[in-house]
Image (cartoon, rainbow, N blue to C red):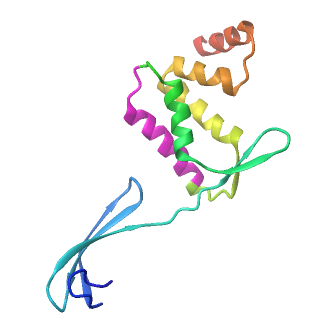
Amino acid sequence: MRCSCCGTGNTRVVATTTHSAGGEIRRRRQCQNCGHRFTTIERVPVELPIVVKDGVPLRREPFSRDKLKQGIELACAKRPVSQAAIERLVEGIESYLEENNIGEVSSRTIGQRVIDGLRTLDEVAYLRYAIVFLNLEDLASVRCEIDRLLA
């Protein structure tokens, strides 16, 4: 690592701090040449999977954290669900994909993890998401899902 002041490559790490959110490592460094102290931030590059969408023809697109979060926020709109709880759900799904080192994942798999998470967060948000995800087309199927929730 080069010194930000004098440009020499003779630096040493004075302190290291890791942040689990975002996989960030902060290092406090000191130049052995001029004594200048500076901070570097390192991020581990993560390869997220390709999402395989149902339909004819099959579509593939890169996993989008923002798209996942937006769908969950839409289901939780005007519900007493904190932004922190939504963030934890998104991070949990993202962590699952990272830890299992999946190259391709079905959109159904991601949707099922969202459904499972929303069921514990808020039943109304769960039902909103389930209507679209489970393709509940009529009131009878929605009623059946409500009865499953109440049981």
Quarter of the image with the C terminus is: top right
Q: Residue 63: image x %, image y %? A: 61, 50
Going 74% across and 10% down the picture, which residue do you hit? Answer: 138
Residue nearer the viewer, 29 or 96? 29
Q: Does the magenta stretch include residue 84?
A: yes
Quadrant location of residue 18?
A: bottom left
Going 64% across and 10% down the picture, which residue do you hit? Answer: 147
Q: Is residue 17 left or right of residue 71?
A: left
State which region is magenta: 80-97
Going 68% across and 58% down the picture, which residue do you hit? Answer: 103
Position above or below: 81 against 24: above
Q: Residue 132: image x %, image y %? A: 67, 24
Q: Main secondary structure of the magenta part?
A: helix
Q: In this view, does 136 lie to the left or right of 149?
A: right
Quadrant location of residue 4?
A: bottom left
Quadrant location of residue 55?
A: top right
Q: Residue 3: image x %, image y %? A: 25, 83
Q: Does the magenta stretch include residue 88?
A: yes
